[in-house]
Image (cartoon, helix red, strand yellow):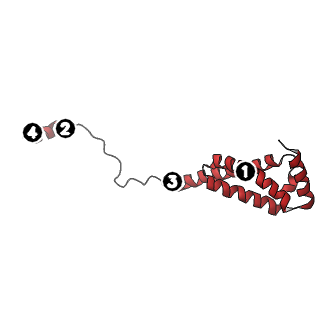
Amino acid sequence: MITSEDTAMLSVLKKDNTLEAYQYFFMKYYKPLCLKASTMLGNMDEARELVQKIFIEVWKTRQYQQIEHAPGGFFYQLIDARCRLLQENAAVAAQQNKAPCPPCETGPALVPTSISTPLIMAIER
């Protein structure tokens, strides 16, 4: 839900590109975004780092100019997409790091068979 304060700060941010206006959104959404990322990634330290990186990227590239309605929704979408990408990359890396089963060096497995009658007689003597 967008508040009138969000609307006013977004207007100032888009018009003047002031760091103070951007800082408002960081302070308001940092903790909830960290919780979202932590839930998806399972690691709070990684989540904090990711949220900080997203805020820095958005500031440097001025992506905030693309925010049409809800700044919170904008940041949540960015975090969700980045977390999903990290999860996919981790799954691919885990699959690639899986050691293949080493080839059997002894040849095909021997299948036990019953002992033949002459062999049994030789053993019993």
Earlier residue among tags 2 and 1: 1
In the image, what residue occupies the spot 36% across and 55% down? 105
Label 4: few (<14), some (14–19) or many (≥20) C-alpha neighbours in 10 Å: few
Dot label at residue 116:
2
Say what amino acid the circle numbered 4 marks. Glu
The residue wearing badge 4 is 124
Residue 22 appears in the rendering: yes
Q: Mark on residue 33?
A: none
Q: Which mark is residue 98?
A: 3
Taking the view exactly as shown, the residue that stands out farthest to the bottom is 60
Counting residues from the start of the chain, the first of labels 4 and 2 encountered is: 2
Mark 1 vs mark 4: give the one in front.
1
Residue 42 screen position, x and y as percent? 60, 49
Q: Nearer the viewer, mark 2 or mark 1?
A: 1
Q: Judge the density around disc 1: few (<14), some (14-19), many (≥20) Cα neighbours within 10 Å.
A: many
State the CA–CA distance, disc 2 to disc 3: 44 Å
Q: Residue at x 80, y 53 (%)?
A: 25
1 and 3 marks in contact (CB < 8 Å): no
Of 86 and 13, the residue lying toward us: 13
Give the SS element for disc 3: loop
**Residue holding disc 1:** 79
Q: CA distance from mark 1 to mark 4?
A: 77 Å
